[in-house]
Amino acid sequence: MSEESTRKPDPAPTHKLAVIGYGTQGVYHTRNLRALDDVAIDVVGIYDTDPRANEDAAADGLHVYASAADILADDDIDIVFICTPNDSHHDYAISALRAGKHVLCEKPAMMNSAEMREVAAVAEQTRRMFMVHQNRRWDPDFNVIKKVYDEQLIGAPTYLVQRIHGSRGIPGDWRQLPEHGGGMILDWGVHTVDRLLTMVDSPVVDVYGELSFALGHQVDDGFRAHLTFANGFHAMVDVSTTSFLPEAKFWMQSAQGTVVIEDWEMNGRMVRRTGAEEDDATPVQAGVGLTKTMAPRILDYKTLATTTPPVEVLPLPEVDVDVMDFYRNARDVVDGVAAPVITNESVIRCLTVLEAVVASARTHEVVHPEQA
Amino acid sequence: MSEESTRKPDPAPTHKLAVIGYGTQGVYHTRNLRALDDVAIDVVGIYDTDPRANEDAAADGLHVYASAADILADDDIDIVFICTPNDSHHDYAISALRAGKHVLCEKPAMMNSAEMREVAAVAEQTRRMFMVHQNRRWDPDFNVIKKVYDEQLIGAPTYLVQRIHGSRGIPGDWRQLPEHGGGMILDWGVHTVDRLLTMVDSPVVDVYGELSFALGHQVDDGFRAHLTFANGFHAMVDVSTTSFLPEAKFWMQSAQGTVVIEDWEMNGRMVRRTGAEEDDATPVQAGVGLTKTMAPRILDYKTLATTTPPVEVLPLPEVDVDVMDFYRNARDVVDGVAAPVITNESVIRCLTVLEAVVASARTHEVVHPEQA
């Protein structure tokens, strides 16, 4: 080993972070940052309106601030993590940036794209980081699909379905209330559409949206977003809180193959055609009729036995991603040595497309948010 | 038993039928009619341009007519069954009706709704039967879904997916050619949309269509049709000839349950919620994040073990339908004792909605075919 490579690097500066909102996500980030020994961001304290959250924080050895303003007035704090209900993100973000803090923020970043544009502009002016915790860009299932898409492992994909199916309705708190930014568009829409826009490098030319209000709330309890990209790729996002039999999380096809990821446990596979069609299929009985076109190619999906002409069944490709890179990137952004992995432009774009989904569902017409 | 009930009914008159086009479907109908001992329709002869079809017919003991005109001139023949490529149905139908024949016809009835209106009008004028073989209204899977919908076995359904997924492309004959009415809209569209319109008693107010040309033919090799009915019900029809991993044939949800039919073999089940939600779900780890909303209710789909609050897993309901009723109904219509089970109005309506799917895909806008 050379002398240079054994020389210790300068120790990274230690940052001090305060959490606004010590609920599920505030606790989650605190634990992650404490567990990471390569990210020098100390969680120092929290502010929350809930006495129980304050007790939890004190038990966790955190300083309990009396107000968010007290955090912003504390010169020791250089990063604030906003983990409060959705409608409060905008004001906290603006105040924190103007107070000279770097800001991390839970999703949905903002209630709408206009709010997000304003916050992005203030971050630009104050030269401070504003970065949204779009954690599900690191989900293994999405990254497998992205790899299949990027590397054309089934050829050039034509259509993707991305589903989030649950059957418990919407949690019975502020998430049911429109004034706090409840509903599935601002919950799972912000993940699912964000990931699509991250994967497909092409403008969104057509958006057809359908909202579900099956549970009788004022907010949507699910939605379907049908997107067409300028490059011809189609995608459907299907989010439902009334699906008692979830369908596959990801399903993507091309003219030469199909890939499926069935569940959170990453059960799935790829099937590819390995050669040209030999002949027309022999008609088979299907239901009360005959079909050549839909004659099965794989006769037993349980054992994945194949018929001719041959298709091959492959396991899902491996991916190696680590959601903790979000914190590592945040530290590097604050230290001025990296660009944000989640750009504010991408967040504005996602909110704009989601607004197109809502507008389409309300008008019953197609919306063309990024048409040339 | 009373004397009256033991008295034999008058023997039903025997009808004589000729088939135009002795391909897969012409042979299929001939065999069915010969096998049915309660339908007095004798298949007498055929006309086909293919020498091999003529040899087959002669071997089957059928008279081989030298032309379709010879069939129409034969006073012994009172029913004609049109089993030729799609673009020839219109002219054969008009000629046969004008010659005083009753007409049965393979699907798609016509190339478009205008042709079908014309034929329906001629049938009306000539007081002859024109009835299309919409055989897949008798498919067991569709009839199970229809029963769940009609009897609200999972409550009031909100959304249905109907899929026809194959991976063999389009058979390499006239079915690839637009001038003969090739493509999946006129193949499986005519079944799938027809069944939807049969099931949902409400006007189609919104149609959003996406056509696939993944295989490079001039005709569509698949399509997705998103329909919204005036009663609020949504449906998607998804037909693909490039699906190497078919998804479930039918999937329907309500706020209280879901039903799935996975395959032609009628594997499937219903899951229903049996009571009110007890509490918010406990957040669970899913991918790289936590979720309350999407916390699984059924922990092991292989064994269908359930969690609380309880849901029940039920088998698919039983249905008892017989596609041979098509021929029985045709005989009764000809005998003047029944109305057609497949009305020409329903066929016109289906073609109109399919034209809306194509128009939507071409214009990238929503079409409103039956909006008040």
Image (tube, coloured by chain):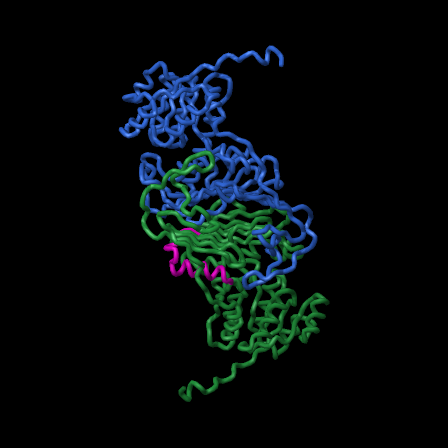
Chain colours: A blue, B green
Who is closer to the viewer here, A92 or A299?
Answer: A299
Question: Relative to A284, does residue A268 appear above or below in the rendering?
Answer: above
A336 horizontally vs B78: left or right: left
Image location (x, y in percent) of residue B305: 43, 50
- Give the image quarter of residue A300: bottom right
Q: Residue at x 38, y 58 (%)?
A: B152
| Percent position of residue B188, x then y | 55, 56
Residue B234 visible from this viewpoint = no
Q: Residue furthest bottom?
A: B3
Q: Pick whichever, B37 or A307, lies toward us.
A: A307
Residue sitting at x 63%, y 51%:
A306
Q: Nearer the viewer, residue A239 or A114?
A: A239
Residue B141 located within the stretch drawn in magenta: yes
Q: Position of residue B161 (x, y in %)?
A: 47, 52
- Count of labels in the image: 0
Instruction: Tell me if residue B156 is in the magenta stretch.
Output: yes
The picture quadrant where one finds residue A149 is top right
If the image is split into quadrants, where does the C terminus of chain B sit?
A: bottom left
Residue sitting nearer the eye, B181 or B195: B195
Using the image, determine if residue B14 lies above or below residue B234: below
Which range is magenta? Answer: B139-159
Whether residue A239 is visible to the viewer of this picture, yes or no, is yes
Q: Relative to A347, does residue B370 appear above or below in the rendering?
A: below
> On the rendered image, what quadrant is the N terminus of chain B found in?
bottom left
- Residue A250 image position (x, y, % from top left): 51, 42
